[in-house]
Amino acid sequence: MQTATETERKYDVPAGFILPDLTGAVASLGEAEVHDLDATYFDTADLRLARNKHTLRRRTGGNDAGWHLKTPGTGSSRKEHQMPLDDENVVPAELTGIVRSIVRTRELKPVARLRTHRIETPLRDGDGRTLALVAQDEVGAETDAGEQRWQELEVELVDGGPELLDAVEELLRAAGATPAAGPSKLARALDDRLRKINRKPKKLNPVLGYAREQRDTIAEQDAAVREVEPEAVHKMRVATRRLRSTLKTFKASFNQERAEPLKDELKWLADSLGAVRDAQVLSQKLGRAAEPFPTVAQELRDRFAIAVEQGKQQLHTDLDSDRYLALLDAIDDLVDDAVTKGIEDAGALGRAAKALRKADQLLDEATADDGELHEARKKYKQARYAVEVFAEDAGKPGRQLVKGLTELQDVLGAHQDSVVAREVLQDAAWERPNAFDYGILFARQEQVGEETRLGLSEVTEKSRKGSLRAWLS
């Protein structure tokens, strides 16, 4: 299977649109090629791929005939997975594996057929290098709802940079093109069905809106997590923690018969993600700290490389498991049921305030004991997530309170990191000939722990300003 990152912009154009002179953006235009493309798109009956901004097709014609799966990227970029054509109209197992967390046990079947007459023009620099391709498409779409026809235009980068897209767009818009109303041809063909499926309640209470955001983030990050992209692993883990915390704090908003077992499963997923993420973070932090001791630094890098690899293997196993699919279904059932019923919890804001008071209490009662500070940290994390639910509606004080709690949590987190780092160093130094070097690093981590404790009072006081918390009363 081949993968590539596709960066393009799409435009709606009126009938009879003529491509303007684009030599103001590039040195020359190459000879245009004409292609007739025939693509069958696959999805579940409830369009789970389209709803999650994925497209899966089997296409003939053009220079890249085959199976194509496009997954979301950043900005105007998308990742494309490609496989060669076969004789059967059955989605290759390699591609179904990538979208397994979205389709789960549902059948993938044809939902649309698009025939496209394409005129493709290369945009070149002074050396004849192709910077981008401009595709003028006449599209005919067939779905269960009937047939549609339209024209559109795509500009896809080859060797050019994003500044080229800006320059070309300026010329195209001056000629009458407008940014595409939809993300893809398929979305346009299925527009009516997608609108009905994606219809949302006019007003969600903040708790349910927050829970749904976390549910959606978990689903959105799945593909990148399978590639073990550090930022994606971090985002999915945070979303998993936020959702679990929301179920704990706002029990009245959810069916508890469903919510209680789900909390354990969310912890299982967070722990699996954490095995990778924590090893990566510690490797960076201790690697920098150990730079004055090259042998120790290498030993630590090797140690964490093993931990990260083991974590990746277990994470892949977990993501490919029926347990993970059952968890995703359980999240959907719980959140969608609460949204459908429109459950309201009049005391939700008070529960957020209560969680914050409990965190304050634990920190006030904590001594120099590392375990007590760690418990306070965990409670502040729960409290911050609860405050986040209402912070936007509270305006500036709400946002400032979240910021203050984040800073407090960061200090407590830095202290806990120093505790974990000391444990790692102590274990790694066992029977090492350079144990003295480890001892120096251990002492420095003790100092980090002491410095973070000394810095607690300032961030604590800042987070407890009456002006930041008055709206919680």
Image (cartoon, helix red, strand yellow):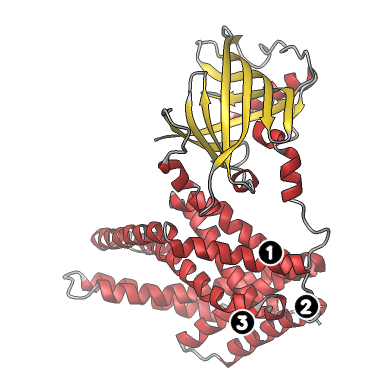
Place residue 385 in its image quadrant.
bottom right
Q: Quadrant of the N terminus?
A: top left
Q: Nearer the viewer, mark 1 or mark 3?
A: 1
- At label 1, counting other C-alpha atoms closer than 10 Å, the crowd grade (few under 14, some 14-19, many 20 or more) is some
- Asked if marks 2 and 1 touch (Cβ < 8 Å), the reply is no
Viewer-side residue, 364 vs 381: 381
Element under disc 2: loop
**Left or right of residue 204: residue 56:** left
Q: Amino acid at mark 3?
A: Ser
Residue receiving disc 3: 457
Residue at (51% x, 10% y) in the render: 128
Q: Identify the residue at horizontal 76%, vertical 78% (top origin).
A: 348
**Residue 345 got which mark?**
2
Q: Is residue 68 above or below residue 93?
A: above
Q: Is residue 292 above or below residue 118?
A: below
Q: Which mark is residue 336?
A: 1
For the question of whether residue 164 can be seen, the reply is: no
Sequence-wise, which precedes: disc 3 or disc 2?
Answer: 2
Q: Position of residue 147 (x, y in %)?
A: 72, 27
**Circle count:** 3
Q: Are marks 1 and 3 in contact (CB under 8 Å)?
A: no
